[in-house]
Amino acid sequence: MREFNYSKIKNQKWDSEIMGLIAAIYKEVGKQELYLKQRPEQLEKLVEIAKVQSTEASNAIEGIVTTNTRIRQLVEEKTTPKNRNEQEIVGYRDVLSLIHESFDVIPISRNYILQMHKILYSHMNNPMAGKTKNVQNYISATYPDGHTEILFTPLPPYETSEALDRICEEYNRVIGNMELEPLIAIPIFIHDFLCIHPFNDGNGRMSRLLTTLLLYRSGFYVGKYISLEAKIAKNKDLYYDALSKAQNGWHEGKENAVPFIKYLLGTLLSAYKDFEERCALVGTKLPALETVRRAAANKIGRFTKQDIRGLCPSLSISSIEGALRKLVDLGELKREGAGKNTCYYRVN
């Protein structure tokens, strides 16, 4: 089995792009702390929206979908799931809520990862819930002509438990001894987790939940207010591309994790920028029409009512709908489509 030794990484020289991303993220962390002190109640509304978006997006990446209305009912109102997709969605909701509420007392260990996986499948009958894989899995891609190619072969089942123990031990050691910058250690841990691919099902979703947990435990709370999963889902080709590049030579310990580190840090920084933008909208007491007008001014190309809801957490959905109608009547926005396919774009 390949070695998991994060000590060799601490002596690695990182390029200026990675160093720049890390510096920019720490600058944003300082700004966020200030915002949270100034208006904690107003920002609480961002938390509920981010929970809905994270649950929806992380499941959608894996093809697990339901309607916008049902997602909100399942996450906000905790209604009973009606089918398999909804059972998987509420399992994700439960683990995400657990991380939000108790991240500081959830250690990074194989047993805790297995327990979270068990909760992920707690609303359905999955005999492998909370257990490492019992069959070899493969990371493959299906192309437009219908043929499938194996892109990467993860560790075999008999090596999986020990490998999970090792990445947890190494991560805890370098973080505990402050040997490695958390913003480097976190993407490396997640990348190793995805290369091990420890479960028969749910590896991608578990990796995103663990990303949130590790970030929170190191003091990076932006995912609580801005959905990192939604950002990944929006550009999932970039996510898979970075992962694929970083996996080459992994079994021999010769991989180059830099593409995945840059991808994750770039996503994190983008979320912090979104947070700042939303704080500016939350912080100004304006009529609904003006709030929606300013939110729309931040959008390029087509956008939906849900996009505006994300930017205007203080407004009800009916206030947003009313303001969008008014802006269409005023000729500031154009409306396209109908029903759930309705979208808008700016006229100038």
Image (cartoon, rainbow, N blue to C red):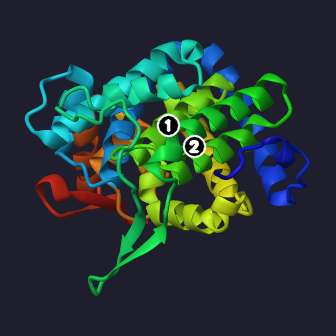
- Name the foreground residue: 269 vs 131: 131
Location of residue 108 by image quarter? top right
Image position, residue 203 (x, y; %): 42, 46
Three-letter code for the amino acid on which mark 2 is drawn: Ala
Which residue shows up at 84% across the image and 24% down it? Answer: 177
As helix, strand or loop, the secondary structure at mark 2 comes to helix
Mark 2 closeness class: few <14, some 14–19, many ≥20 residues within 10 Å = many
Residue at 26% x, 24% y is 76
Estimate the x, y position of residue 94 in percent, counting from the top left. 33, 24
Query: Looking at the image, which residue is at 50% across and 37% down?
Result: 226
Q: Name the residue under label 2.
A: 271
Figure quadrant of residue 40: top right
Q: Which sits in the foreground, 86 or 207?
A: 207
Confirm whether residue 226 shows in the render.
Answer: yes
**26 on left or right of 324:** right
Q: Name the residue under label 1.
A: 226
Residue at 28%, 87% in the rendered image: 145
Question: Are circles 1 and 2 on residues that touch, CB within 8 Å?
Answer: yes
